[in-house]
Image (cartoon, rainbow, N blue to C red):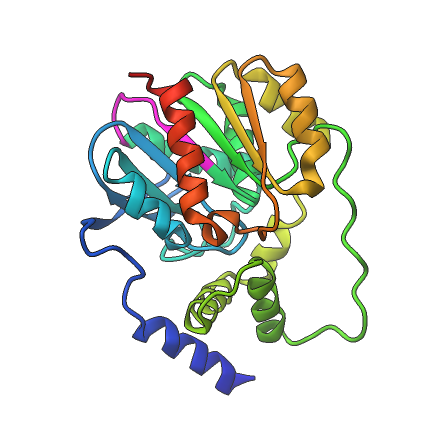
Amino acid sequence: MRPLIAILLACLAALPAWADPGVVQHHRYFETSDHVRLHYIEAGRGRPIVLVPGWRMPAWIWQRQIDDLARTWRVVALDPRGQGESAIPAKGYEPHRRGADIGELIARLGPEKPLIIAWSLGVLDTLALIHDKGDRAIAGLVLVDNSIGEDPPPPPSPPRQGPKPAREVAMHNFVASMFARKQPQAFINRLTAETLRTPEPAAAALMAYPMPRTFWKEAVYATAKPVLYIVRPRLEEQAANLAARHPAAETHVVQALGHALFVDDADGFNAMVRGFIGRRIWVK
């Protein structure tokens, strides 16, 4: 498998940034309170939007959102610890610390309260921040395609069939499975190379957060700030319950899109976010 790793890393190094040249991006770093150097991408000016990616994913998976939203607002996309260009520490791969990382990033952005847009595992990290620190530092939440502890629980994943594939193959298959619409092979290869940067013990810890489902549900209902919950049909009933029970929540169920739905339909996703901001966050 070593030749495959070399090919994937070469793809990562050779490809230019997947970005609109009309949007100026800055690569910045900060040090957390436990002395871990984290990277983030920053673009645009104005009120801040913080983007938090999912398991093993880099900040630049949000590139289509950075390109669009930075034309109006200040957009900051985080590489969580152990991911992207951030440091890979030996510890901290649990929700309280990962939530604190997001909070410490927000604190360095200035007094303006940001909208947080979080996807997949980033949803749980963001809810851990709300659970531990409250919602005083945020303007609102967009939570994308992960369970929030509402009823009913998400259906279990089907059992694996056959022998366990090599790590590189497993990650390539995982990345490809995130999309319902065909993506360029170079893009899939680049994302796969990024996933291989996260050490296996860290990746396993991130997939096994030791929290009951009530932890996430309590966090969602603890905030009075506006919440937009965007999911695929597998979480439709959770979305319906959230809309019925949370006075500041809006929900949207998308059809025929993959887990990385903001990549599959970037224009549609960006329009939903812009509409939500105009109605509920920074109303003109």
Q: Is 109 drawn above or below residue 254 in the view shown?
A: above
Residue 188 location, x and y as percent?
48, 68
**Residue at position x 63%, y 70% in the image:** 170
Q: In which quarter of the image is the C terminus?
A: top left
Q: In which quadrant of the rendered view does residue 45 lie?
A: top left
Could you say which is closer to the camera, residue 123 or residue 142?
142
Residue range corresponding to the magenta coloring: 109-117
Q: In which quadrant of the rendered view does residue 101 lie?
A: top left
Residue 100 location, x and y as percent?
46, 33
**Residue at position x 66%, y 15% in the image:** 245
Residue 36 location, x and y as percent?
38, 47
Q: Main secondary structure of the magenta part?
A: loop
Q: Does the magenta stretch include residue 258?
A: no
**Residue at position x 54%, y 34% in the image:** 96
Q: Quadrant of the N terminus?
A: bottom right
Q: Is 154 drawn above or below residue 142 in the view shown?
A: below
Q: In this view, does 239 lie to the left or right of 248?
A: right
Could you say which is closer to the camera, residue 152 or residue 244?
244
**Residue at position x 42%, y 18% in the image:** 280
Could you say which is closer to the camera, residue 165 or residue 176?
176
Residue 133 location, x and y as percent?
49, 22
Q: Is 156 drawn above or below residue 184 in the view shown?
A: above
